[in-house]
Image (cartoon, coloured by chain):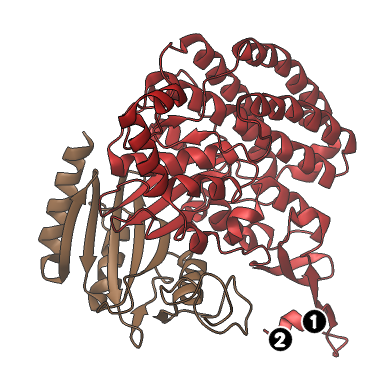
Amino acid sequence: MAESEVLLEVRRNPLETTMMVNMGPQHPSTHGVLRLVLTLEGERVVDAKPDIGYLHTGMEKLAEHKKYQHVITITDRTDYLNAMGNNLGYVLAVEKMLGVEVPPRAQVIRVMMAELQRIASHLVWIGTHGLDLGAMSLFFYAFAEREKILQLFEAVSGGRLTPSYLRIGGVMADLPEGFTARVLDFCREFPRALEEFDRLLTHNPIFRMRTEGVGRLSAEEAIRWGVTGPSLRASGVPYDLRRVHPYSGYETYDFDVPTRTEGDVYARYLVRVQEMRESLKIIRQAVEKLPPGPVKCDDPRVSLPPREKMLTQMDALIYHFLLTAEGLKVPPSEVYVAVESPRGELGYYIVSDGGPMPYRVHIRAPSFANVQALPLMVRGQLIADVVAVIASIDIVLGEIDR
Amino acid sequence: MEGQEHQTRRHIFQQRFGPHIVEAKEQWGELTFVIAREALIEICQALRDDPAFDYKMLVDLCGVDRGVGADPRFEVVYHLYSLTHRHRLRLKVRVNEEEAVPSVTGIWPNANWYEREVYDMFGVRFEGHPELRRLLMPEDWEGYPLRKDYPLRGYRG
């Protein structure tokens, strides 16, 4: 592409006023390594062309060379703000192919983790969104709250950003002692932080002027371009997989799916802020209904036997060896499972040929579809608004480039 | 409920496009049709516009290499979703290396990047695509990384 060598090009003809400007991949407001080739007329954006691939690490290829249980660690690293949610989508897909029954306690724990992760992800979004528009102090408040969630993750799994906590057939280990009390503490304190965010941004006249009516996306266009998640719901389509195609027992929780009809940056902002409140509701219910019992399915062909059994019983030792050395026996088939990530529909398409490693793993990344619709939202806007729009669709380049 | 929805969709689909169906499958509650490449555009157009189908959303599009010796070697997989019927459908077309798949960018504009990715990773060409060039790999890259004969490590074997 000829554009790629051009940093800044001013047309020779002085009467022709369009100019091409390269934004990114190192621009701080592109949230990673997104590159935009903007065609400008003065400060107005005539066209924008996203250029991706700077973070391509071949995760789908890598997944074809790892056993099913080892691919979980790769999923952590695709959308690095939603590690628990990625784990969940992947293990649900493999469990569907195996026909595994997940114990109720593990299901509730999974929902709890996925919703904590959603809040943590939205906190990164709100912090950086504010930062991009000049509201710097919010960034520190948001990251201080997020830190509390990351510490909870560290307590259950030992990892903060890449917990790899979920397992095929359950979760890695039961919750540590006093964990639910810590979660409830968080649930009690967090609404106060949300109120503070409201004071700082929601009712802030400067923030509203920068976001209201900016970067509109109509419902029809959003559907045509496969946009999902809060960006779609802010355009008035109440499509939330937790509600439409419930998984992991989401149908038993009481929560609302916030939508707006304006489809602008401010609407997307309001939807996400409200989603944090709804997630909080789900987490409280999860703590309440957390049943006793095992956190892993007891099928020895799927999950490792408990350590004590492995050390004392011959058959447990054999299963342990088989599962580690030979891997899972997944029948030759294909499956597509989608979950609601903080950014939209996260789908895993897995093809099995009966071997211990997946034959093909394709990750349907919500950001990939959402960023492709970016030009629609920024055409006709000012160049400063591009920053606001990018922040409002909350992209993670790790899952776009995979 | 979902099973019933499958039955109706399956029935209508088979009635309308019977001669173009190469293979029909229902597994794990997911409906898959392998269809003839030549009929792809016609079928996709109907799937989007006919209210009986109403698959307004192209959720995902990806490629699969069926193996070096397979004939046809590649599969292009389309995941469609209908918001009104709350139904998912998987379509597939099969294609060999020297053949091309008609592009669905005219029906679902977001197929643009997805088809570019399939071209980038598998070398499958899409006829009628507005700008078929690599998406994730560098422009001057040689080879197609997700093909089964492409090594995981080491440069060119």
Q: Secondary structure at mark 1?
A: loop
Q: Mark yes or no: residue A237 visible.
A: no
Chain bearing tag 2 is: A
Q: Which residue is mark 1?
A: A6
A239 relative position to A26: left or right: left
The percent position of residue B151, horizontal first and vertical second, equals 49, 74
The percent position of residue B125, horizontal first and vertical second, equals 42, 81
Which amino acid type is marked by label 2? Ala
- Tell me the red chain: A
- Tell me the brown chain: B
A6 relative position to A174: left or right: right
Q: Are marks 2 and 1 on the same chain?
A: yes
Residue B44's place in the image compared with B84, above or below, is below
Residue drawn where x is 49% and y is 78% of the image: B144
Task: Classify 10 Å Cα crowding around label 1: few (below 14), some (14-19), many (20 and above).
Answer: few
A218 relative position to A13: left or right: left
Q: Quadrant of residue B24?
A: bottom left
Residue A47's place in the image compared with A245, above or below, is below
Q: Quadrant of residue A274?
A: top right
Circles 2, 1 touching at the beta carbon (< 8 Å): yes
Residue B4's place in the image compared with A157, above or below, is below
Q: Which residue is mark 2?
A: A2
The percent position of residue A186, horizontal first and vertical second, equals 69, 16
Which amino acid type is marked by label 1? Val
Task: Classify 10 Å Cα crowding around label 2: few (below 14), some (14-19), many (20 and above).
Answer: few
- Quadrant into which the C terminus of chain A falls: bottom right
